[in-house]
């Protein structure tokens, strides 16, 4: 049971990470050749005439000229015809990979693999992959081996995961700016704890430059001049690419330094240990931000001369932190600043900003550029202006608001799935708990009988009845009741009497089946059938819900709220899912057999095991489906759901080869 959770660096986990849902996935089909084809084609598009990029959302859209070119190159008459939907999917992923996903910023290539770099911490995330084919598109762009696509087994947002706990608490040094979100989403109040010692750090106002080149030139010269005083320096960059660019410039300038980024993270401990020593210059991504303790004079406090060096660094003003660009979130900037002035130590922080930085381009607005143009200063002369500094702060507030809307949007959609998830997982837990499922199965059988009767006996008038259809459908499920062994007998009873006969017969025939194979065997069959049906159909349902969510945004053009449509359509789909699970289980339980299997060497499982050892994904991933379903005997109706778990009718699946 989930009683309570205490989260360290709570803003990083509950806010930064919450933009991406947690997904457990497995391999789907082999990658398609189209990834390489489109990766080559999109490089031939012109970035002004053939597509446009939204500055704020970074969404990429092909122009008419771009669409015409792609149709010509791929020999497709209409790229956006419904039958070419999959082609558009590959094209959009290839465009996103080529333009939005930047090497050494969003990812690095290591040992022939594309590894994602965390936006907020700057660290590598091995094992994580972008979904919906985007990771494969990036692999095609980089010319490395394209891994198999994945299919979702289970998914949950971090918000809904942590809301499962009865009590939730956490700690961090940078939560106040997000106090509204903590309260609205998690119901958590933010309490500021006073520092142990008074803050001794000096935070200087931003230095703003008109161009990026001008900013970098001044940064290099300021680093060189501060280094001459022997004061330790920590320079923060927003990407691996920027850290390597700055490192190369410092090398040419003759400034000795250490680099800490996702590419050489194995040296992190040693670099951080020396970052507070005299003459130390450390260039780092966000890796040296959150949770990094830089000790003035070095972390090896037991060595001879450490106290003298420590006092000398304090005399020089402590650690000097330079930020080369503002991050999207103020909290990340504050984390970098917080490396200096720890536990009452002196320190200083200075941020350098240019109007060509990504944050300023996307959210800065024209007002700052207008003010800068009034000054008439050259590109290497910084400006300190209250209007500009305030505009930078408001740009970050806009970005934080934009990201909050993204997280809230993600949560609203996941809340729909969350209710379904709770029901499915409760059924699954019930099956795993080992308790008897007999009453549950009898209720399912009664519902199946009732649905068959309602379908074939639609009204009070016998002229509308289909006796043959009812008898055949019951026969597909189980042996017939003695009162209804022939279709003619159906007309000897009223509709209500037939429903009552079937209701009583459900328990009788189930008891008979249990006597045939034994109580213990029956409990095992129930458990295995229910688990397999839930796993198979739930995986397919998650894929269908993801497809629904991808396309539901178009409902806005029809003046309909996409969330309302998603909620109502999702509710219908979940009802169909529950019916499909019951249908498969009930139409299998009277035909399933358990057989003794010789245990292989090293196999410690019970010798009594189901013949079918397919994974839940077998029905989805198996391209052939040519063999007969294993572990089942008895007649299966042509219009019944195939026992293999594919969700298709028997005549269109395994019945096609029968």
Image (spheres, rainbow, N blue to C red):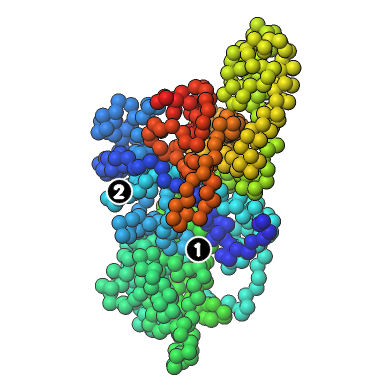
Would residue 340 be found to the left or right of residue 67 on screen?
right
Near mark 1 (Cα within 10 A), the count class, few <14, some 14-19 or many ≥20, is: some
Q: Is mark 2 on a helix, strand or loop?
A: helix
Would residue 249 be found to the left or right of residue 584 on screen?
left
Would residue 9 be found to the left or right of residue 32 on screen?
right
Q: Nearer the viewer, residue 302 or 225?
A: 302
Residue 162 higher or lower than 324, as above or below: above
* Residue 376 in picture, x, y percent from top left: 37, 60
Q: Quadrant of residue 513?
A: top right
Of circles 2 and 1, the one toward us is 2
Q: Report how far apart the C-alphas of labels 2 and 1 lie in the structure.
A: 30 Å
Task: Write down the residue under mark 1.
Answer: 332
Find residue 141 and name its label: 2
Which residue is at a point 42% across and 68% down the rendered structure image?
A: 236
Residue 127 higher or lower than 574, as above or below: below
Near mark 2 (Cα within 10 A), the count class, few <14, some 14-19 or many ≥20, is: many
Disc on the earlier residue, 2 or 1: 2
Q: Quadrant of the C terminus?
A: top left
* Residue 168 in picture, x, y percent from top left: 66, 59
* Residue 249 in picture, x, y percent from top left: 29, 69
Which residue is at a point 46% across and 85% down the rendered structure image?
A: 300
Which residue is at a point 31% across and 42% down the rendered structure image?
A: 35
Q: Quadrant of residue 281?
A: bottom left
Q: What element carries label 1?
A: helix
Which residue is at a point 64% across and 61% down the rendered structure image?
A: 5
Q: Nearer the viewer, residue 331 or 350?
A: 331
Q: Which of 128 and 629 is in front in this view?
A: 629
Would residue 649 be found to the left or right of residue 518 on screen?
left
Find residue 486 and name its label: none
User: Which residue appears farthest toward the top when viewing the image?
Assistant: 463
Residue 91 higher or lower than 247, as above or below: above
Q: In which quarter of the image is residue 352?
A: bottom left
């Amino acid at each position: 049971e989930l009683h309570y959770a205490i989260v360290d660096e709570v803003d990083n986990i509950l806010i930064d990470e919450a933009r991406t849902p947690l997904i457990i996935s497995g391999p789907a089909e082999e990658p398609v050749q189209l990834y390489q084809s489109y990766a080559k084609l999109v490089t031939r598009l012109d970035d002004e005439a053939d597509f446009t990029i939204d500055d704020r959302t970074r969404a990429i859209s092909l122009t008419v000229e771009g669409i015409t070119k792609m149709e010509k190159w791929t020999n497709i008459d209409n790229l956006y015809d419904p039958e070419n939907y999959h082609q558009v999917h590959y094209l959009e992923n290839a465009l996103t990979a080529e333009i939005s996903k930047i090497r050494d910023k969003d990812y690095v290539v290591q040992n022939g693999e594309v590894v994602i770099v965390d936006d907020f911490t700057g660290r590598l995330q091995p094992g994580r992959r972008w979904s919906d084919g985007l990771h494969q598109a990036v692999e095609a762009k980089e010319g490395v081996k394209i891994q198999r696509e994945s299919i979702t087994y289970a998914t949950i947002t971090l918000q809904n995961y942590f809301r499962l706990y009865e009590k939730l608490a956490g700690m961090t040094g940078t939560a106040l700016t997000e106090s509204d979100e903590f309260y609205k989403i998690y119901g958590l109040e933010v309490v500021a704890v006073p520092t142990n010692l008074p803050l001794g750090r000096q935070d200087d106002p931003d230095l703003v430059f008109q161009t990026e080149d001008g900013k970098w030139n001044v940064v290099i010269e300021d680093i060189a001049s501060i280094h001459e005083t022997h004061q330790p320096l920590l320079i923060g960059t927003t990407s691996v690419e920027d850290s390597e660019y700055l490192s190369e410039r410092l090398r040419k300038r003759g400034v000795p330094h250490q680099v800490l980024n996702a590419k050489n993270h194995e040296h992190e401990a040693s670099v951080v240990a020396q970052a507070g020593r005299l003459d130390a210059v450390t260039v780092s991504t966000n890796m040296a931000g959150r949770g990094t303790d830089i000790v003035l004079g070095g972390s090896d406090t037991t060595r001879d001369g450490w106290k003298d060096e420590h006092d000398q660094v304090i005399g020089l003003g402590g650690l000097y932190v330079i930020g080369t660009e503002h991050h999207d979130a103020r909290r990340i900037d504050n984390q970098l600043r917080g490396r200096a002035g720890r536990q009452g130590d002196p320190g200083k922080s200075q941020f350098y900003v240019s109007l060509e930085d990504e944050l300023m381009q996307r959210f800065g607005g024209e007002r700052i550029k207008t003010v800068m143009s009034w000054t008439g200063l050259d590109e290497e002369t910084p400006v300190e202006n209250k209007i500009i500094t305030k505009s930078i702060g408001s740009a970050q507030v806009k970005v934080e608001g934009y990201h909050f809307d993204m997280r809230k949007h993600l949560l609203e959609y996941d809340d729909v799935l969350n209710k379904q998830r709770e029901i499915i997982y409760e059924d699954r837990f019930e099956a795993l708990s080992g308790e008897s499922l007999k009453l549950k199965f009898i209720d399912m059988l009664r519902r199946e009988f009732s649905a068959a009767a309602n379908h074939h006996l639609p009204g009070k008038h016998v002229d509308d009845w289909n006796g043959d259809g009812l008898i055949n459908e019951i026969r597909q499920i189980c042996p017939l009741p003695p009162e209804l062994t022939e279709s003619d007998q159906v007309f000897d009873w009223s509709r209500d009497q037939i429903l009552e006969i079937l209701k009583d017969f459900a328990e009788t025939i189930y008891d008979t089946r249990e006597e045939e194979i034994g109580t213990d065997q029956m409990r095992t069959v129930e458990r295995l059938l229910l688990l397999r049906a839930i796993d198979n159909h739930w995986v397919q349902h998650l894929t269908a819900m993801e497809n629904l969510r991808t396309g539901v945004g178009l409902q806005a053009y029809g003046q309909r709220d996409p969330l309302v449509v998603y909620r109502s359509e999702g509710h219908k789909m979940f009802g169909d899912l529950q019916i499909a699970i019951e249908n498969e289980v009930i139409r299998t339980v009277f035909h399933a057999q358990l057989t003794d299997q010789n245990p292989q060497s090293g196999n410690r499982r019970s010798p009594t095991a189901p013949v079918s050892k397919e994974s839940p994904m077998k029905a989805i991933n198996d391209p052939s489906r040519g063999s007969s379903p294993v572990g089942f005997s008895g007649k299966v109706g042509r219009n019944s759901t195939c026992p293999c778990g594919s969700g298709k009718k028997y005549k269109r699946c395994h019945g096609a080869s029968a």
